Image (cartoon, grey):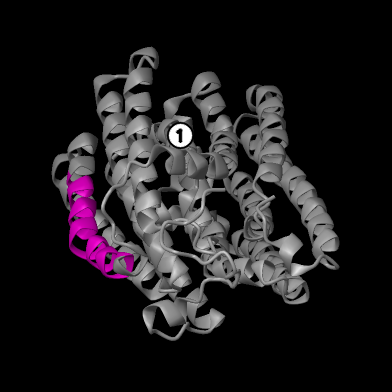
């Protein structure tokens, strides 16, 4: 791996200390988790409000157009984003500076937009659906820049700033979207105002915080040092592939529903799946808040503490799964009627299956964060490929036979496979490094 440009001494193998670098005391993990949960929960609630507005004032077909646009854009942006935020926040030895991450993100996001534009002629979409797809791609472009800035904040354990950004983008964005859709019932126009609100928050808040922190890492000017960018891209590529494959796997049932059933049924499936995604929000919040600390524990070869923290995270994930299933079983039909319309409440069994899957995904999420902290990037690719294959086979067999229930069962099987594989590999990684000296534990695997 290329040596850092900001003078990391050859003899200095100690992990990055955010308190020493910024002069700000790193908060306890519970404080970081609280901020992260608050931010992601608020952001997810705002995104759910978009679906609720579309369901109550529009139709399931409108939601289906929006959900299909997300299903097309998400895997492409996951691939080109290279999950740089995870690599950036786990860069415990500060091998790259913020300019490297920002420049590579610019190149990747531009490529993603071009890829979306290239596939548009082959999708056979209506004019409204095509406009929605291009506008969602524009939103993903802005979101990708906010994400790499959030990685810088996360590295300095400033999760309160990440939360503020999420809440500002979510609240202002849904306000603009909801008002416009209520007045016009025009999805592309509402999405355009949504994008404008997100761009304003990015310019007025995210970039201001980024400039202050980036001064500690050599600034944030774009630097096209191709050898250095190539090395970083190769380091991050396995995680980018993992993210893209995971996103593709999550969306395969949606592709099958649209192809075999209808856009309206895709809208119903996506709407019901979103409330239980709150479990993933909680898991991601805790995982993101713990990621930098996990990476330092592993880099400093404090394997016992690393293992203890991972076990705590898995225990929390199990609790999340139990609570999600319990809540949906107790009041799922009422909740769907309240959130959307009585039409959605007829899908109670689907809601329960999706809740169980989301709970299992929370456990898998923690295991993948632990693998990233251990710099085990390549093995995540193999796990994701197996999970993708499972989803594809099950969706192909079950969606035509059991419709929306078949799609949910395909996602459930993929979650079980991912947990089993990630848990086994993480256990072997911990065992291999338990008795390894520090010098041998530092290189990226």
Q: Residue at the spot x=46%, y=56% of the render? A: 96
Residue count near mark 1 (Cα–Cα under 10 Å), binned few <14, some 14–19, many ≥20: some
Looking at this view, is 339 or 297 the one in front?
297
Residue pushed farthest left? 183
In the displayed structure, would residue 278 be above or below residue 399?
below
Nearer to the camera, 62 or 422 = 422
Q: Quadrant location of residue 40?
A: bottom left
- Secondary structure that dominates the magenta span: helix
Start-end of magenta stretch: 193-214
Residue 106 can be seen in this image: yes
Q: Position of residue 433 (x, y in %)?
A: 80, 63
Viewer-nearest residue: 363 or 200:
200
Q: In the rendering, at what x and y percent does residue 69 appear?
A: 38, 32
Q: Is residue 212 shown in magenta?
A: yes
Residue 61 at least partly seen: no
Q: Quadrant of residue 248?
A: top right
190 is within the stretch colored magenta: no
Q: How many marks?
A: 1
Decide if residue 425 is on the left or right side of residue 78: right
Coordinates of residue 191 in the picture (x, y in percent): 23, 42
**Residue at horizontal 75 percent and vertical 47 percent from the top:** 416
Q: Is residue 201 left or right of residue 346?
A: left
Name the residue rendered at 36%, 31% in the picture. 111
The secondary element bearing badge 1 is classed as: helix
Which residue corresponds to mark 1?
A: 71
From what the image shows, is residue 70 above or below residue 41?
above
Residue 239 is situated, as x and y percent measured from the top left of the image, at 57, 44
């Amino acid at each position: 791996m290329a040596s850092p440009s900001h003078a990391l001494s050859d003899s200095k193998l100690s992990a990055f200390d955010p308190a020493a670098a910024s002069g700000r005391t790193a908060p306890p993990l519970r404080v970081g988790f609280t901020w992260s949960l608050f931010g992601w929960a608020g952001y997810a609630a705002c995104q759910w409000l978009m679906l609720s507005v579309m369901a109550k004032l529009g139709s399931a077909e409108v939601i289906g157009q929006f959900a299909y646009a997300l299903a097309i854009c998400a895997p492409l942006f996951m691939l080109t984003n290279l999950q740089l935020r995870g690599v950036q926040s786990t860069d415990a030895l500060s091998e790259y500076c913020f300019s490297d991450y920002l420049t590579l993100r610019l190149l990747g996001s531009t490529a993603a937009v071009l890829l979306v534009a290239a596939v548009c002629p082959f999708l056979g979409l209506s004019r409204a659906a095509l406009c929605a797809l291009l506008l969602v791609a524009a939103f993903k472009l802005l979101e990708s820049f906010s994400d790499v800035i959030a990685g810088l904040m996360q590295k300095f354990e400033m999760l309160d700033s990440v939360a503020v950004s999420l809440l500002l983008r979510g609240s202002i964005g849904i306000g603009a979207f909801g008002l416009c859709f209520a007045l016009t019932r025009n999805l592309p126009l509402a999405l355009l105002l949504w994008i404008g609100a997100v761009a304003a928050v990015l310019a007025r808040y995210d970039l201001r915080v980024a400039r202050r922190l980036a001064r500690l890492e050599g600034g944030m000017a774009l630097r096209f040092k191709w050898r250095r960018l190539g090395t970083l891209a190769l380091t991050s590529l396995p995680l980018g592939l993992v993210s893209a494959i995971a996103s593709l796997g999550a969306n395969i049932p949606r592709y099958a529903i649209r192809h075999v059933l209808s856009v309206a049924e895709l809208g119903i499936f996506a709407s019901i799946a979103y409330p239980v995604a709150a479990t993933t929000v909680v898991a991601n919040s805790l995982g993101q808040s713990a990621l930098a600390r996990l990476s330092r524990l592993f880099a400093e070869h404090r394997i016992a503490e690393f293992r203890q923290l991972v076990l705590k995270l898995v225990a929390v994930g199990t609790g999340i799964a139990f609570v999600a299933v319990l809540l949906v079983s107790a009041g799922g039909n009422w909740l769907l009627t309240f959130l959307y319309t009585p039409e959605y409440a007829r899908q109670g069994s689907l809601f329960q299956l999706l809740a169980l899957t989301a709970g299992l995904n929370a456990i898998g999420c923690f295991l993948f964060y632990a693998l990233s902290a251990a710099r085990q990037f390549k093995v995540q690719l193999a796990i994701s490929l197996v999970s993708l294959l499972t989803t594809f086979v099950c969706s192909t067999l079950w969606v035509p036979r059991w419709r929306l229930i078949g799609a949910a069962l395909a996602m459930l099987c993929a979650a079980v496979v991912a947990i089993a594989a990630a848990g086994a590999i993480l256990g072997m990684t911990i065992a291999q490094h338990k008795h390894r000296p520090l010098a041998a534990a530092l290189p990226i695997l």
